[in-house]
Amino acid sequence: MEPRGPLTRAGSGKLEPAGGGVNETVSSGDLGLVWAMIIALTGSSGFIGSAAARVMHAHGHSVTALVRPTSRREHFRSFVERFVEGDQADPGIWPELLQNADAVVHNSIDWAPLQSGDVETHLRRNLLGSLLLLQAAHEAGVKRFVFISSVATHHDISPRWEGVIDEDHPLRPSGLYGACKAAVEAHLWSAHYSWGMHTVALRPCAVYGVEPVRLERSHGYKQVRKLLDGEKVSKQDFPGGGKFVHVDDVALAIVRAVERDEASGRAFNLADCYAKHTLLGKLAAEQMGLDPAMVELDEGPPAKNMFSKEATREILGVELERGEAGLRDAMGELIAAVSK
């Protein structure tokens, strides 16, 4: 299957991101000559999916979005060329989804069986469904398949890596979610070596930013809500911390993983910084002009391990350097959204 047509090189034209969010002017010169593609996207109405659709559109690609009949679409409708209604694990809708597609970005997961403990349904819908979609894409002549995996594929960290985990570290998950992601990754590499497919796994950590549909799912929402209600943010209510990456960086990594030939057959960890959950409260309180005593900071130890950014920077060109400033900006956006 041939790509649909070339975008212009740098100097002969630029593509402006539609709707904002990615802080760059996208130029095909950043990547050499980039071909405009038809990209089939699952999980398109969600936080990551809708951001990915926006960046795909900004890069000149055409998006075919798989959505449930009940999914809201107003937040990303303008970035989608064609909607396909159906269920992620229903092979009956895959021919329509894959029609004329140059690439698949598989982002969807059914959380219901994981949350209820229904292991059989989880394995059928999330694991087998993903593997069969990969097979269907191959049979339909789709050459590129990007899978949204997770850093949850890592749990038991080897001391041999001395606290900096690169993509060569073995996958040793501790739960069904991470195990499912790791299993799909194994089949990506099989497809790459057996069929010659351009397959890529992206492993984001906790993805932050303002959720466009379910605001309460945004990281920091509960802290902001407490502060707006005049309540303190305590380390008892918000213990520990986590690794974070901005949704726009994940979306850009997705598009670059589709576009860049050198990404083929590789996995990429997507983790920008580590932060205590109380830090999100502190950053929010500062922007709200509140007394610092409203937030009890967690002074516990930092993360034992961090993920290497080298491959993501060098191959995908995503710097992952927003750090605390990025979290601060996101808390400001979240305060504005919650206050409406």
Image (cartoon, rainbow, N blue to C red):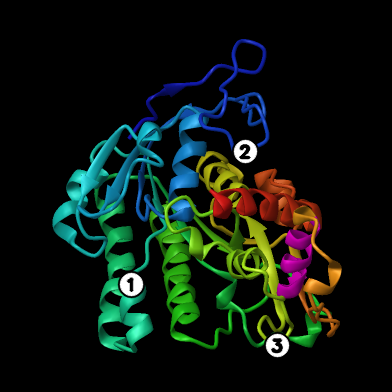
- Res 39 → quadrant: top left
Is the N terminus in the top left, top right, bottom left or bottom right quadrant? top left
Q: Which residue is mark 1?
A: 126
Mark 3 vs 1, N-terminal side: 1
Helix, strand or loop at mark 2: loop
Task: Give, as a three-letter code, the residue at label 3.
Answer: Gln
Q: Which residue is mark 2?
A: 22
> Which of the two discs, 3 and 1, sits closer to the camera?
3
Mark 2 residue crowding within 10 angstroms, few (<14) / some (14–19) / many (20+)? some
Q: In the shown orientation, is residue 86 left or right of residue 51?
A: left
Can you give x and y, in whole percent of width and height, for residue 170 in the image? 63, 79
Q: Residue, x 74% and y 48% (percent of image)?
A: 319
Mark 2 vs 3, N-terminal side: 2
- Magenta part of the chain: 274-286
Which of 53 and 103 lies nearest the eye of the viewer? Answer: 53
Task: Give, as a three-letter code, the residue at label 1.
Answer: Asn
Is residue 89 visible in this depiction of the protein? yes
Task: Give, as a three-letter code, the residue at label 2.
Answer: Val
Helix, strand or loop at mark 3: loop
Q: Residue, x 35% and y 53% (percent of image)?
A: 42
Mark 2–mark 1 Cα distance, whole angstroms, equals: 30 Å
